[in-house]
Image (cartoon, rainbow, N blue to C red):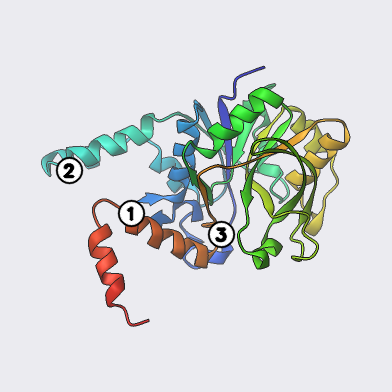
Amino acid sequence: MKKISKVVIPAAGFGTRFLPQTKAMPKEMLPIVDKPVIQYVVEEAIDSGIENVIIITGSNKRAIEDHFDAPSEDLVKNLIEGKKEALLKEIERIARMANFVYIRQKGPYGNGIPVLTAEPVIENEPFAVLWGDEFIYSKPPRLKQMIKVYEKFGGVVISGVKIEKKEDLKRYGIADLTHVENNVYKINRIVEKPTPEEAPSDIATHGGYILPPDIFSALKRVKPGKGGEIWLVDAINLLKNEGVPIYTVVIENGRYYDTGNKFEYLKTVIEFALEHKEMNGDFRNFLKTLKI
């Protein structure tokens, strides 16, 4: 079984829910205190043993490339003269984290297209997919937990999250499951955004994927679905119908952060600010002064 060494991070969307902020700035670069969302995603991959990061970009996404590039000479000089060596080490570390490859997305819409766009770089290897505008913070990292399951069972592995509030089930794809062992389940089907009464379980499967190279053939064969778009879940279902097993691992010690919508993004910023070593005390005291 080949080692998972590559991750595809789709980051080509328009970010319309954050307009006008995202007119000129990628939504993946929205800050969580002092780091952009996509850096949390990349760091999860690196901490899981990934060596090659393939980011699928679009127009107005140049800031992502600049962020993971080496710092400019002017910035280095400024930080040295300002005796800010710790900051300099941090931004130099970012550029050295992995081998970064950037591909401009072309073709129709749908979350299957950025995955298909990565085919020439992935070649005939299994690989991971993590979305660039959301992440799961966990110890050990989500992707590391998924890789462990893949190495034992193969097939397709999708990260699973237990939905605590019944009324929130309608926001996600909820899986009909058969228990395998511990926190690992085989997926029988996924019901997209069911009512609480229709939901087959309380486990949402989304956010992180480990896929075989066969997914590229499946993506080319599926017909456009909702909105005339190519959907990754349709290609996964095609593989399932052809005998490829689909698993989910319910992530242990994990918290899902959906930074792709305004309310959840603001909740994430506040939560991380309260844990930030440089400002948690002052920020906590400030929140206590608010008359809410």
Q: Earlier in the sequence, mark 3 or mark 2?
A: 3
Mark 2: secondary structure: helix
Q: Residue at 30% of width from left, 53% of height from top? A: 276
Horizontal side, residue 77 vs residue 72: left or right: left
Measured along the vertical axis of the image, is residue 98 above or below residue 172?
A: above
Q: Which mark is residue 15?
A: 3
Residue type (three-letter) at the residue carrying disc 3: Gly
Measured along the vertical axis of the image, is residue 262 above or below residue 44?
A: below
Q: Residue at 78% of width from left, 59% of height from top? A: 227
Inspect this view and state whether residue 237 appears.
yes
> According to the image, label 2 marks what residue?
78
Residue 4 % position (x, y): 59, 25
Crowd band around label 3 with a 10 angstrom C-alpha radius: few (<14), some (14–19), many (20+): some
Residue type (three-letter) at the residue carrying disc 1: Glu
Residue 199 % position (x, y): 77, 59
Horizontal side, residue 29 vs residue 124: left or right: left
Quadrant in the picture for the N terminus: top right
Residue type (three-letter) at the residue carrying disc 2: Asn
> According to the image, label 1 marks what residue?
275
* Viewer-side label of 1, 2: 1
Could you say which quadrant of the image residue 123 lies in? top right
Q: Residue at 60% of width from left, 34% of height from top? A: 146
Q: Are marks 3 and 2 in contact (CB under 8 Å)?
A: no
Residue 265 % position (x, y): 48, 61
Q: Earlier in the sequence, mark 1 or mark 2?
A: 2
Mark 3: secondary structure: loop
* Viewer-side label of 1, 3: 1
Crowd band around label 2 with a 10 angstrom C-alpha radius: few (<14), some (14–19), many (20+): few
Inspect this view and state whether residue 33 appears.
no
Horizontal side, residue 217 vs residue 14: left or right: right
